[in-house]
Image (cartoon, rainbow, N blue to C red):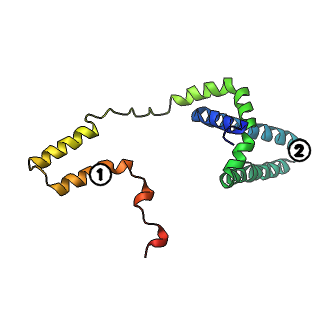
């Protein structure tokens, strides 16, 4: 399924997470606003001069939106992420393309408030050079063999996968 259309679309959407998030949030805002405008117009016709019906209907609609428009879709998305993302990929891409002028402005505006990503500092010393320094320090008696081995092991930790050193829960006492 890696080469299917939904998969390619999902990958393209995830290339720019900020734009994707703004697109989804803007679409959600538009749907909710449209829903409440239409609902308010219908409730005002239904209630005539009785505002209690309009208020009660508005509160009921608010709870319906929260439950059926916010909580339930998110719970379904968490429970079935692959199915939902495959199903939603094409409509999301169409919406992203249609809303591009607005979302582009919103992404730029939101970017003003995002903290800058920390720039990765270049290492002052390479791991090989550090290993040579450890060997020299050990040879000259500045550190003992155990300390040198421990420091070497610490430097190797980023290359070791957890599954190689972990004890499965079923084997623990």
Where does the image place residue 93, in percent across and percent down from the top left? 71, 33
Where does the image place residue 19, in percent across and percent down from the top left? 61, 32
Task: Determine whether, in the image, residue 109 is placed left or right of residue 154.
Answer: right
- Residue 49's tag is 2
Classify mark 2: residues with Cα within 10 Å, few (<14), some (14-19) or many (20+): few
**Residue at the (61%, 24%) spot, across then down:** 105
Q: Name the quadrant of the C terminus.
A: bottom left
Helix, strand or loop at mark 1: helix
**Residue at the (62%, 25%) spot, across then down:** 104
Q: Name the quadrant of the N terminus.
A: top right
Determine if residue 24 is in view: no
Is residue 88 placed above or below 160 in the rendered structure?
Answer: above
Q: Which residue is mark 1?
A: 154
Q: Nearer the viewer, residue 171 or 22?
A: 171
Where does the image place residue 41, in percent across and percent down from the top left? 85, 39
How many numbered discs?
Answer: 2
Where does the image place residue 74, in percent across and percent down from the top left? 68, 50
């Amino acid at each position: 399924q890696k080469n299917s259309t939904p998969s390619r679309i999902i990958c393209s959407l995830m290339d720019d997470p900020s734009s994707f998030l703004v697109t989804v949030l803007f679409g959600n805002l538009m749907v909710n606003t449209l829903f409440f405008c239409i609902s308010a117009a219908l409730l005002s016709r239904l209630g005539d001069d009785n505002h209690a019906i309009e208020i009660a209907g508005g509160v009921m609609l608010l709870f319906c939106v929260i439950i059926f428009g916010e909580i339930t879709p998110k719970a379904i998305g968490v429970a079935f992420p692959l199915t939902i993302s495959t199903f939603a990929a094409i409509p999301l891409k169409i919406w992203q393309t249609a809303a591009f002028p607005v979302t582009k402005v919103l992404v730029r505006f939101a970017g003003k408030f995002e903290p800058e990503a920390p720039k990765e500092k270049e290492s002052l010393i390479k791991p090989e050079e550090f290993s040579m320094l450890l060997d020299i320090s050990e040879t000259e008696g500045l550190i003992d063999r155990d300390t040198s081995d421990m420091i070497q092991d610490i430097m190797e930790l980023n290359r070791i996968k957890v599954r190689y050193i972990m004890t499965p829960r079923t084997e623990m006492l």
